Amino acid sequence: MSLSDMSRPHEPTMKLRLTLLAVSVLMAACGSTTTPIDSGIQPPAEWQSAERATRLQNNQQWWTRFGSPRLDRLIEQARTGSYDLAAAMARVRQAQATAVVAGAPLLPEIQGQLNANRQKLIHGPGYSQLDVYSGDRVVEYFDASLSAAYEIDFWGGTHAARDSALQSLRASQFDRDTVELTLLSGVANSYTQALSLREQERIAGLNLANAQNVLRLVQTRYDSGSATALELAQQKSLVAAQQRQLPLVQQQAEEARITLAALLGQPVQLLDLGQETVEQLQWPAIDAGIPSDLLRRRPDIASAEAQLAAAQADVVVARAAMLPKVTLSATLGTGANTASDILRSPFYNLTSGLLTPIFNNGRLGAERDKATARQQELLQAYRGAIVNGFADVEKALNGIRGIDRQRQWQSEELQQAQTAFDVAQSRYQAGAEDLLTVLETQRTLYAAQDQNVQLRLSRLQASVALYKALGGGWEVH
């Protein structure tokens, strides 16, 4: 067939090709590959441990409700300095690029080509496959072309691949939110723990000084014959125990600082906790709202739902691969033996093709079964994420309620322990009480002071746990 024949295709053939193209575009536009996700789990009407259920509004900066400017600064440092969060953001960018790649086949792919060729016979008479021979050893030619190719998405496989990539992108964004929520709650927990241990270190120092004061009193009475060697040894043992406790608390406090610095992405030498005390931190009153709200708050649940939607789209892709494919291509080109004549011989070429699988030894069916099983797996993972989310909130609410009840009585315990020690010390100094009573009240007072700090820390961290379980900051409005 000559170029002139190729440039004048039959009119019915052109109409048929245009009709096929229009139909394919219409079917691609109307294709639907995903359906709404139904977990099959009915949320409870209210939380078992909640005191009330109210409407909530989003409070993204939930950490500000602890009333700590230092914590606010540490949170911002973590958001900019954490390598885990930076890696999660990079994964989101990867998913964005993947979504662009998956959506590219929805439009025709257009390519341009420009060639310049020179062929020369070095020696010998040449042979039939060469364009040159001994009488004409050099040949040059130039050509240029513009081609477009498109696969008609009859079965929705291309759209499904794009939808799968978009859902994977959503999942990666929710995963990033999960990493950020875990990071920020970790910073809040580590900071409150560091302040709590610093307070415990201060209490341990005061108790050591107090035990040393009592030791001096016992030593004075022993020197005067009013105290026994046993009493002196008992008090020295208590002082030694207090001296041992102090470096233990200091070690734990330094470990908490190291952990916090690692979350911020910096060496511990650069960490400055300031002079804030654990007593200055506040815990906000948090209402959990209703359980059904949790499904739209928790990023891990949202990620599981997006992954399930992507798996549903993958099933469509696997099924479409088992069906015939129709491709269309068009080429507009020109060529010449000299560069100046390259535009004098234009031509075009239209091609359509049908490709259908006939035998692949069960590979395509296995790919479909694999995608279906993956979908079923992610459905169960989605249901598990929902149930675990409900459990996390219930445990956090139950923990807050239990700690609040303990603190109601612990303040009374601490006050009475301090009174008992003061009375016992005064009576021992006056000779009206034995040392055993003083030692016992000392231990009781130290335990009550230490328990007071630990309960305050537990209450602060229970609030952080509830924020994390709720998927971030939420407050009553």
Image (cartoon, rainbow, N blue to C red):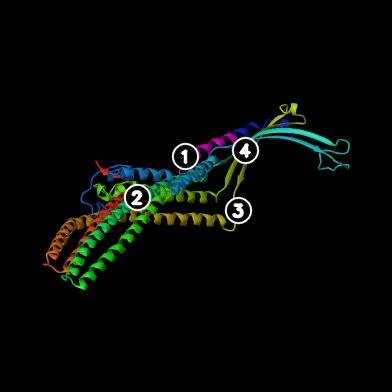
- Residue under label 1, please give it: 30
- Residue under label 3, please give it: 358
**Looking at numbered disc 2 in the image, what kind of residue is underneath it?**
Ser
Q: Position of residue 378 (x, y in %)?
A: 42, 54
Q: CA distance from mark 4 to mark 2?
A: 55 Å
Label 3 SS: loop
**Looking at numbered disc 1 in the image, what kind of residue is underneath it?**
Cys
Residue 185 circle label? 2
Q: Are marks 1 and 4 in contact (CB under 8 Å)?
A: no
Mark 1 or mark 3: whose residue is earlier in sequence: 1
Q: Are marks 2 and 1 in contact (CB under 8 Å)?
A: no
**Looking at numbered disc 3 in the image, what kind of residue is underneath it?**
Ile
Residue 428 circle label? none
* Quarter of the image with the N terminus in it: top right
- Residue under label 4, please give it: 329
Please say whether residue 37 is visible from this viewpoint: no
Give whichever of 28, 76 is nearer the camera. Answer: 76
Label 4 SS: strand
Q: CA distance from mark 2 to mark 1?
A: 45 Å
The mark tally for this picture is 4
Q: Give neighbour class at mark 3: few <14, some 14-19, many 20+ (Cα, 10 Å).
A: few
The stretch in magenta equals 16-33
Q: Give neighbour class at mark 4: few <14, some 14-19, many 20+ (Cα, 10 Å).
A: some
Mark 3 or mark 2: whose residue is earlier in sequence: 2
Indicate whether 278 appears above or below 142: below
Q: Position of residue 35 (x, y in %)?
A: 41, 46
Q: CA distance from mark 3 to mark 2?
A: 56 Å
